[in-house]
Amino acid sequence: MAFRNTAHERNIATYTLRCLNRATPPRPSHPRCVLAEPPTYGASHWGRRAPWCRWMSTSQSGFISKVPQHPTWEPVAERQLPPPTKVSLDLVDKLERLALVDFGSQEGVECLENAIRFADQLHVVDTEGVEPMDSVLEDRALYLREDTVMEGNCAEELLRLSRITEEEYFVAPPGNIPLPKREERSAMLKHSEL
Amino acid sequence: MAASCSGHSAMLHKCVRFKSLCNVHLCSGVFIRRIWTSRSKCQLQPKLQSKSSPQMVGVVALEIHAQIQATSKLFSSSRVGFSAPPNSHVSFFDASLPGTLPVLNRRCVEAAVMTGLALNCKINTKSLFDRKHYFYSDLPAGYQITQQRLPIAVSGSLSYSYLGGKKRSEVMMKSVRVRQIQLEQDSGKSLHDDQRSRTLIDLNRAGVGLMEVVMEPDMCCGEEAAAAVRELQLILQTLGTCQGNMAEGQLRVDANVSVHHPGEPLGIRTEVKNINSARFVARAIDYEIQRQFEVLESGGTVLNETRSFDSKTGTTVPMRDKEGLQDYRFMPEPNLPPLFVYEGVASVPDGIDPAQAVVIDRLKAQLPELPGVKRTRLMEEYGILPEHSFTLVNENGLMEFFERVVQKTKTEPRKLIGWVIKELIGNLNLQNLKVTQSPVSPEALAQLLNLLESGFISSSAAKVVFQEMWKAPEKGVEQLVKELDLELISDREELVKICQRVLEAHPDLVQVIRGGNKKVLNKLMGSVQKESKGRADPVQLRKILEEMTS
């Protein structure tokens, strides 16, 4: 069964380590919510090997990937799509409060709207008579691992990633502070210690 | 470790949320056991009676988070361990670094299935994982992986009982429905430093496997809830699926409390959190019921809110509201396909190694004798009282101790239960020892009881010997009896001599007895026992004294 092999061969720790050791972490260029090109490091749960191997090896290397070997696409005309979603400032406010993030500006809101527009293309897919799925692999058994300790003891390494630490702790702002009203927010962020 | 631990707490003396981190070892398990014998507060529940409406009652539902007893976490292979240096048991996945993925621990699935079976649940052979989003700094991913839509076990029940009635010796049998058991991740721990206005984060607990046991609102007061919690705790400990130590946070109880008139729809409920010992379960709930009675009686309304129990004042206080309405934005966990477990080995599909699969029948066969069954068996087999069966089962290792004594002696179980429950437990508690640490072995106690049974020593002498055994467990019982010169005086002549001495010392009493007041004989018997250090056989002694005073 593919999944069993998967987890035996996969090694998250090594994989992540590679990311950590890179001089600059790969970040999509500015607007974060625009869908970037398929992330080169995107981990696939399903590949028989860790994904970076796939990108390094040729597609004829002999293993069967569950990802199609060649991308195909057809352009979707604007008129096939539903009307674009407009994101109200109130909704932005709610999302910001729920996730304690700051969209920042009108530009950020446009980003979000563009992302929704991108996803609108899925409306074109004919799903008549298809049971909704969470994943295209949901008929596969979930791999179960043995209850053994293989990771941990890397506090130092992890704490290095944090801007502020105290002894062996990460340091965060106190509790869940309610976000101030839109108007007050930028002023508050400027004076924040953290 | 202890040193560094106290260092942290000194630094954080104003920390709120987990301030007792370092002290918990000392007090753990001491009150938990006492729940059956302590007077609970159910009967103190106020009877609110107004002229227009019938009496209101409390309604209690529980959500219990049980930490799964496993070596590694639910989705990562870092260690599960209490009171380790901060952030030492954290993998990259636990810290939610990009590119890491969950890999499910089979042990956690098996533990949830076993717990489900023990709680008479239907096990879902297919269950799903979901993400529940909320923002808190001890939850680095910004979401918790849980089972919202299709949990691993549903529709069960938990039978529990407690001692009630006027004399608190009547066994009250109750049952509560278990809505579901879901697998989910634990969060990290936050230490709030109010003085410096910041939070310290320890992710050691982040990602530890939890079973959330959701119970229906079938309970009516703190005592019932506490008994249900205690029973669940015992079941989990018997199964070995959770260590169940509330002080260490291995078992966490949240109570949903409301009040209503029987027959009417349920009232608005509050959720009471931070109940961190079994003793407080009853207290927190009864306080909250009482508070809601009073709010309604004074014409107010109960708010749907989260309240925190303050063990110092014994009250519940509103928790700072988390940003108004919670929206967890549940979504299917995209990184985990459905979890399948199988009824029997035969139903494991081709391509999956049956040895690797979670098979319900196999786990069913491994289930140990559960506490309820144990109690019934003890009562039937040994003819002991229900309350004694509770003590035997509730105290870890006590039942095994008792049964070993029973095997090794001719004394009737009903007669020796007092030795185990009173003498043994009394001494253990005095020295703060567990049953398994008892210096007196079941065999030694059995030997002592055999001496008593065969009339070699008196029962008062046996108690003296028992205390000595405690002090010098390396010495044999017979050796102690000899050293202490406690064996019964079998020589009649010797006994008569002692009696003679006593009678000569109390001519007045002899006069009274001869005058017809036979009760005074007991006084003489006491004096003789004192003189003989309890070595006189009471029956024989009475006979001699009667003869001598007639």
Image: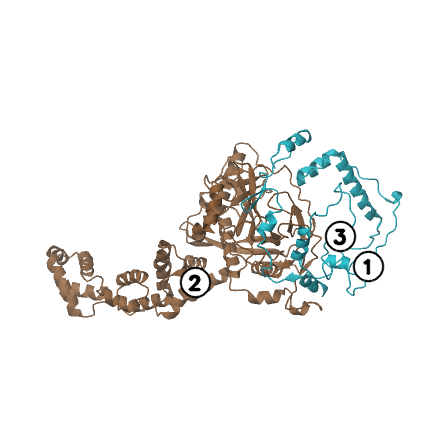
Note whether B188 is above or below B381 in the view shown. Answer: above
* Of residues B275 and B93, the one drawn nearer to the viewer in this rendering: B93
State the residue position of label 3.
A40
Visible in this render: residue B517? Answer: yes
In which quarter of the view is residue B500 placed? bottom left
- Give the percent coordinates (x, y) of residue B474: 32, 66
Q: Which mark is residue B399?
A: 2
The subunit letter for the residue under badge 2 reads B
State the residue position of label 1.
A69
Disc 3 residue type? Thr
The subunit letter for the residue under badge 1 reads A
Disc 1 residue type? Gln
**In the rendered picture, chain B carries what hue?**
brown
Evaluate whether label 1 is on the same chain as label 2: no
- Give the percent coordinates (x, y) of residue B138: 59, 45
Note whether B111 is above or below B311 in the view shown. Answer: below
